[in-house]
Amino acid sequence: MEFCAGGGGGGGGGRWRLHQLVVAMLLWISLHRHVLGCSNTNCNLVLTEAQGDITSPCYPQIYPNSQACRWVLQAPAGFIVQLYFADFELEEAPGCIYDRVMVNTGSTEVKFCGLTADGLTLNSTGNVMELLFTSDFSVQKRGFSVSFQHVAVALRNQKVKIGNGNGQTTKVAVALPTLSHLTICFEVERTSQKQKEWLFTYYKSNGDTALSLGFDGSGVKLVVNAVACPLDSIVSQTDFTSAMRPFCFLWTSSSGLVAGYLNGIYRSTICSATIGHSVEATGEFRLGGQDSFNGNIYNLRLWDYAMTEQQLAALTCDTVGNVLDWDNSQWIIPSSVAQTDATLSCICYPHCIHLTTTAPASGVSPPSNTPLTTTCLSPALGCPVLPPITPSPSTIPTTSMPLAPSMSASSSSSTAGSASPEGLFYRVSFVVEDGGSAPSPQDVERTVDVWLNDTFQNWTHTVYADSIRVSQTSGNPSSYTCQALLVLYYVTNESSGEAAVSTQLSDRRALVGAGLQIQSASIRVQLIENCAEDGVLHYSWPESRPTVTQTLPCFPNKEQSASRSCLISTQNYSSYWSAADFSNCTDIDTIEVSAENAAEVAEQLAVISNNELSSEEVSKVVTKVKQLVNVAKINATLASTVVTIISNVMTSSETALAATSGEALKTVDELVQKIEFEGPSVSITSRHLALGISALNTTVFNGTSFSAFMAPNSTDPQIDFESERVNPLAEVILPASLLSGVSLSEADRSSLSRINFMFFGSTSLFTKEQDGRSLNGYVVASSVGNFSIRDLRDPVQIEIAHLSPQPPLNPLCVFWDFSLNNGAGGWNREGCEVSKESSSNKTVCLCDHLTHFGILMDISGVSPHIDPQNNKILTFITYIGCGVSAIFSAATLLTYIAFEKLRRDYPSKILMNLSTSLLFLNMVFLLDGWLASLDTEWLCLSVAVFLHYFLLTSFTWMGLESVHMYIALVKVFNTYIRRYILKFCIVGWGLPAVLVGIVVAVDKTSYGLQEYGKGDSTEASSEVCWILNPVVFYTTCVGYFCLVFLLNVAMFIVVMLQICGRNGKRSNRTLREEVLRNLRSVVSLTFLLGMTWGFALFAWGPVSLAFMYLFTIFNSLQGLFIFIFHCALKENVQKQWRRYLCCGRFRLSDNSDWSKTATNNTKKVSSDNLGKSLSSSSFGSSTANWTTKAKATLNPFTKRHSSTESSSNQ
């Protein structure tokens, strides 16, 4: 019993213990099942899926302790990441110091714990969002469940539902220009079909339809400027299906061509009713219309030119519409109508990005938060969604391909059958060292080529070496520098860049083989930069990736295209633009002009001229307009277009207009003669040119008037006939006697049928400055038929408003003379005078003929103060003075030439050169007026050049006089200079020659014929050959003289101080004698140094006339005064005259000792001889040698010459 009891008790105890063990184990498993079920969960992931879920470890059970999780959510460019917390429970604590979730949205970082994030939605600011989860060692909760999705923000990733009003209308946010050619492409899918349905409508400002496409119940129509063009032969309503399909339509105004491109087939028709029409600007473009299409539209783009079939076939997702593009910035889209669709053709999702991603700069890797993928290409209008590409030897090239210049650039508009993505290009360089096998560079190149391709086998991306260059390192025969071009293709979503490529190379550097080793520190990897945006006049080439070819519509014929490729140089593996290919483009020259197509050509030229034109293009446009005017029958409509063309041309730069302005003016003259009109008058206006034509009845003509004025709220000047306007821009009043004094035959008189009036609101076709005057008014022209009207009995009155108010500075009334300047035209004032009715705001002109009239204002303000009478007097003084000066300059020169003893010293030789210069200056000036009257261009040019040259040589020798005085007075000791006079001659005659030679070489037209002395009267004017270019005059004459004048003034002061400083030491002369001697020195130096030329600097304002008289008198007689003071009054000169030229008691005996005046070498200079010896032949021959104030030591420069003279006379 005990045994059984014990056994029974033992068995029951055993069962109880087993039951306890099972219960304990089940309880332990229950309490720790989360640990057993999720201990190996990976919570550090990069998620690129378009949508998905994220949960905390072991969710919905409590999360483990000590967790550190990180999820990176990455969307393609053009998308953001949207995060939604469906469930959220963490340990709660102040500041979330224990367990927490942190979300980095790209711009901010937010922290959550407790229940705060439950039901919350967050959006990233970029295409990357980061979520981090951290738990501590105690207290766990349920955790969280998060859903995420990619949301399209770029319009390229969305389709738009075509609205039907009710606030759901999609509109264009940019202004559309006037279109005479267009191409519009889009993709569309329908949801249901209606009897009438419109895809888009462009409304004019008045509500009329400018452009529309849709079905009106009878067929598909393209509406252009309210004209409906049937498209039944191109497309039918059934072509618009429930599947997204691409369409392209184009229209050309010049030919009425309408074409469509669908399913790779190009069909066209002619809609003749639209020829000459255009789609007006400043309207409203919207999707749908009065009866909107039921469906969705995508990637609508608009161009201002008609594409060819080849261009349509090559169209890609990256081709941007130059008028309207599928971009958020250009559309106003209600949020409820935009839909994301992963099947859209140009979305390229999720395996590529688009040009909306910022292109990396040179040498910089793309942003790390952007997947580095390339733009995929489409066969036609779209870009298919590409599946991941698995690299294989059959699809990935392993041998190098030739690049620029022999490379074939892949075009962004090519690859009709290609579905392979483009690659990224990396420039790689590294140094390879030889371990002892001494390979050749060719062996190294082959080994490196194999190593590079093996290095990237089965990598996350497909990479191959396209080109390799190996060169031996200078100074190290066992070292080689390698450069390679790597092409990278993406086959996974993992991001990569320069660092990843460099790491892959470094990790595999030990596997080069053939005894070669790579220096790890020498590895350099750079992404090859894009070709930068480049614009030249009419062509703006966008930033492009390497090996991409861009196409742009030609100018002016936009139906053709120019191309340009971004290539990679084989020399340094950098990108560069190739030369643009304009072989398909036609030039303005090729436009054929005939009477039949005149209107079409004019419209085309109006569009062309509305752009910035080069000088060559302006010339071509004007030539075509001239041809058009010559061959066409000009009605008011055609004339209006031609006027617009000329007005557009007038906005071109002065440089572009320089060679064409004359032809443009003649074309306008021919145009007004040919315009056909009905009624008494017609006016045609544009922004810068206005024409008025009035019918003329010669039998009852009693005078007439025209005026130009600016109407309120208008930018175009208007023409008014007969009525009197207050303050017009310009007015022409023709007298009743206009035709009475004209000798015309009866046939000619009967043919007079019109009076023409032209107003030029811009003066760009005319010379703005002439003869020191500037154009300060509008330009008007008037003519009677095509006859020349001159010598009128009663003058024509022309009133012209000033461009800017001016004080009464002697305005001149001028007319445009086509015969001047070798046919280029210029201003002429013959037959015109200024009326006393003129004011500061307008000038009234009285002219005895009809032509183009304008106003020239004196820009210096001097000539108004010189009346014709004073002009006569000044001219008389000038010619008399110059004649006298020439005679006495010749006398001075002959004196020193004849008597050898007079020209032994330096001052006398300098004086001879100055007298020679003044002699030729005066002689050329005296001959100038006569030679100018011969009207020979080359002769006038030569005279002007010589006159300029001798004026400069005279200034130069005056300056050299002062330089010599400085050497003699200031630089007393050690001043011997070899070939002293030769060096002076090189400067005195050579420097002016250089200046004049430069002017002639740069622009010889700077010299020519000028008129002087006419003023505002009708009296005859003087003509001289002189400098026409004011810049040349003020630089080489005024500026040059000012420099010499300042030098001479300084020297004049120094000499006078020397003279006056010695006066106090003399006691043997009276004060009167000293004053007279000092005055003589002052006068002699004044004329020698040309101080009187300074009067010109003070000829301004009310004293201008007085200084002009002083200037004319003293400078025209400079040669006379130099003869008097530096020749006739010289003692040694008088002795030579008396010895050789006189007879009887005036003759000087031959035994007179010439050397007495120069033998005392220790005698100090006296104050009366100081001025004389500085300036003429007395230096070293008529006075003692120079000494300093305190020293009696002889100047070796003087001593040599004094001793020479003494010895020569012994």
Image (spheres, rainbow, N blue to C red):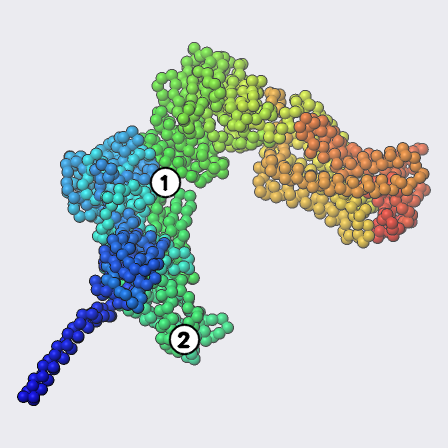
Q: Give the spatial CA distance, label 2 vs label 1.
A: 59 Å
The image position of residue 356, as x and y in percent, is: 33, 51
Quadrant assignment, res 692? top left
The image position of residue 350, as x and y in percent, is: 26, 57
Quadrant assignment, res 670? top left
Residue at 21% across / 62% down in the picture?
60
The image position of residue 961, as x and y in percent, is: 77, 42
Secondary structure type for disc 1: loop
The label on residue 517 is 2
Task: Name the residue nearer the viewer: 661 or 39.
Answer: 39
Task: Name the residue nearer the viewer: 249 or 259.
Answer: 249
Task: Name the residue nearer the viewer: 637 or 792.
Answer: 637
The image position of residue 101, as x and y in percent, is: 30, 60
Vertical order, 310 against 200 (above or below): below
Of marks 2 and 1, the one in the foreground: 2
The label on residue 556 is 1
Secondary structure type for disc 2: strand
User: Label 1 crowding class (10 Å Cα cut-off): few <14, some 14-19, many 20+?
Assistant: some
Residues at circles 2 and 1 in contact by the CB criterion of under 8 Å: no
Residue at 40% across / 26% down in the picture?
713
Tell me the kind of residue under disc 2.
Gln
Quadrant assignment, res 482? bottom left
